[in-house]
Image (spheres, rainbow, N blue to C red):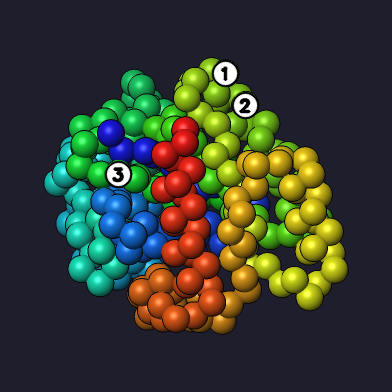
Amino acid sequence: MAKIFCVANQKGGVGKTTTTVNLAAGLAKVGQRVLMVDLDPQGNATMGSGVDKRQMTLSVYDVLLESASVAEAAVYSEKCGYHVLGANRELAGAEVELVEVERREKRLKTALAEVGDAYDFVLIDCPPSLSMLTLNGLCAAHGVIVPMQCEYFALEGLTDLVNTIKQVHANLNKDLAIIGLLRVMFDPRITLQQQVSDQLKAHFGDKVFDTVIPRNVRLAEAPSYGLPGVVFDPAARGSQAFVAFAQEMVARIGKL
């Protein structure tokens, strides 16, 4: 059965989408079967995986409203090596439409259960707000990967996220736990970042992934070419760090 992970952080601009698409590409590179689910109406993870959100006939919106299955709506990205269940602006309407329906927070979980044997990993890119879409992601997932910058405000955002995960765990999804914290956009020359990194390790211990993703221009450029950095420039430091992170994920899941 596929291991399902949300990439989530209630703070915006921390590299959730960059983490999702590059981890998906990294896992595909190390031989894993991957489905990337875009739950953000902006559709950045869809476009960043080489899929044009404007050309999609079916999307995650159709899956949430149960007018299509995951198998029908997911498309294979040849360039990236993984399947994409994409999102576009239609998804913003799903928020309103889901309010009235039954099992509204479990729609994604039910849909993914049908394709559990087809993949090794399912990665869900969540929007920054705690919405019905994020709730669907958290209810479907076995765990949460939290990308975070080593800055003071990031620690405050992390407290909010941990509380949210505790609430979802208590009321909706007993499997949900934080799998690990991923330090992203890291610059070891900045003393504060080093201090926050040390604080994280002291407080969260082995919940902090060993891999650190450096601040890297090539990772930032890749989305404009509609590709993850791992595919766009495999030799870049950031890309190599994400492949190392994928290997760490596979090893860590083997121990769970």
Q: Quadrant of residue 177?
A: top right
Give the numbered dot on residue 31: none
Direction from residue 219 to residue 181 in the image, left or right: right
Q: Is residue 62 above or below residue 52?
A: above
Q: Which one is in front, 130 or 246?
A: 246
Asked whether residue 58 appears in the rendered view, the answer is yes
Assess disc 2: are there few (<14), some (14-19) or many (≥20) residues with their C-alpha within 10 Å of its C-alpha.
some
- What kind of residue is marked 2? Lys
Question: Which mark, residue 120?
Answer: 3
Select label 3 or label 2 by which is in front.
3
Task: List the residue tagged with mark 1.
Answer: 170
Residue at mark 2 = 166
Foreground disc of the pair 3, 1: 3
Q: Residue furthest left?
A: 72
Q: Type of residue at label 1?
A: Ala
Q: Is residue 218 left or right of residue 196?
A: left
Mark before the other along the chain sequence, 3 or 2: 3
Amino acid type, residue under disc 3 in the picture: Asp
Q: CA distance from mark 3 to mark 1?
A: 27 Å
- Classify mark 2: helix, strand or loop: helix
**Residue 213 pos. (x, y %):** 59, 65
| The N terminus: image quadrant | top left
